[in-house]
Amino acid sequence: MAKNLTTRDEDYSKWYNELVIKADLAENSGVRGCMVIKPYGFAIWEMMQAELDRMFKETGHQNAYFPLFIPKSYFSKEASHVDGFAKECAVVTHYRLKTAENGGIVVDESAKLEEELIVRPTSETIIWDTYRKWIQSYRDLPLLINQWANVVRWEMRTRLFLRTAEFLWQEGHTAHATKEEAIAESEQMMNVYADFVENHMAVPVVKGLKTESERFAGALQTYCIEALMQDGKALQAGTSHFLGQNFAKAFDVKFANKEGKQEYVWATSWGVSTRLMGALIMTHSDDNGLVLPPKLAPDQVVIVPIYRNDEQFDAVCEVANTLIKELRSCGVRVKFDKRDTHKPGWKFNEYELKGVPLRIAIGPKDIEKGTVEMARRDTLTKEVVETTSVVARVGALLEEIQNNLFTKAVNYRTAHTTEVSSYDEFKKVLNEKGGFISAHWDGSSATEEQIKKETKATIRCIPLDTDNKQGTCIVTGKVSARKVLFAKAY
């Protein structure tokens, strides 16, 4: 299989687009701005989904499902929310088609909806209208619901996985009796996301708060995790929002407390999407193709037989089938590629392109010696292993690869995180090096907008794990309470 990928140094954006398509992850569809997620790409998403779903349920959440369509009037109930999504909404105005005189299909003008329906860009409004019926007493709280769904945001400039008009995600929506409980929930889910992204995706993240201008529409506070890609741009990998009582008041969601007094509930929402696929690809992959962390690889090991005749093939299969049984009994996801339509070299290239963590080759000479050849995708190194040691070695290598990918990404981020003390230095680092830039900011939205307009860099977050040392803003010279992280972003 000839990969012929554009290299990252040549054109990072083109490299990414080519890799998504050539690795069989996704492709553009006949609907502008929408994608088809192919079986291999969807298998990776299913691995992500399964692990996140387990983590959500371990923290007490349940899954439910709400309508795709939202009455337009619901959006008008929370002003800041509708302002945030108004320009991205797809609107359904009619409910029937008819055959035209020329034989084509047209909209039946007589089938106009009494009230337009919005194809959900996010589900706060329809969910809070529902919660009004579900919540009456403090005994009904906390209400911890998650939804796996698709949403539509009418993006004009799209890129597979990173930004599409329709995408897959999960959105959690919770209701609480107190402000403190809701804030604790928002922080907990940010930590759940960080745990998943770091320990399963092997992508290091910075946990922080969004500035007021970068917050989710309708939120009082947005918690986030930010990751750094290999091209020095940041990617928002997940967000968790403390919504206060805004939606409860907009949709009249009250509960009777222990004293019988009526109070508005406190709300959160949180979500991650198929954008995580983009983060996975851009953090680890190289010029040879995809590199997958073992915990999320649909196939952790692939066995490729090498033979010249049926007798050799049968002998290789006997050894391979024994290994497969032993590996699977240890929970290893293993594939045996017995296709006779392609030569071993072609298969090696294919699995390198698809990022399979470990490749095992078995041929007649290996059988004679009682060995196999193992190739690591992360380092592209090979080693000969005795057949009796394969299972133990595979387990050790998969763990080593997972850790190596994370360490490599951490080292890249460390090397591309720069502290600056002046605006000139800020612009120099941004243009020549990229990455995260730590700098003092005076806290004003005007200064934030000026930096964005002049440099295209945004405040990715106010980090939660850094010392809040006072300083002076790099632009205005005014007092700054703490440093924040800037970067150009996806």
Image (cartoon, rainbow, N blue to C red):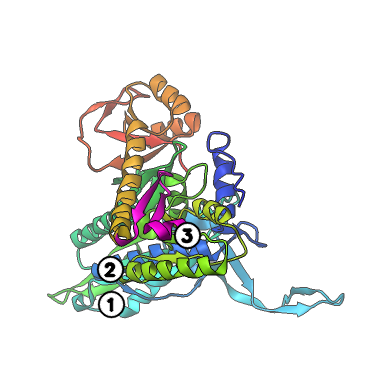
Mark nearer the N terminus (3 vs 2) = 2
Query: Which element is circle 1 on?
Result: loop
> Who's the residue at 35% across and 40% down the image?
408
Residue to which mark 3 is pinned: 364
Magenta stretch bounds: 365-388
| Amino acid on which the number 1 mark rests in the picture | Ile
Residue nearest the observer in this picture, 250 or 393? 393
Height in image: 78 above or below 221? below
Picture coordinates of residue 401 (x, y %)? 34, 50
Residue shown at the point (33%, 59%) measured from the top left:
390
Mark 1 vs 2: CB contact within 8 A: yes
Q: Across the whole image, how many numbered discs are drawn on residues? A: 3
- Residue at the farthest right position: 102
Q: How crowded is mark 2: few (under 14 residues within 10 Å), some or many (20 or more)?
A: many
| Marker disc for residue 135 | 1
What residue does disc 2 label?
175
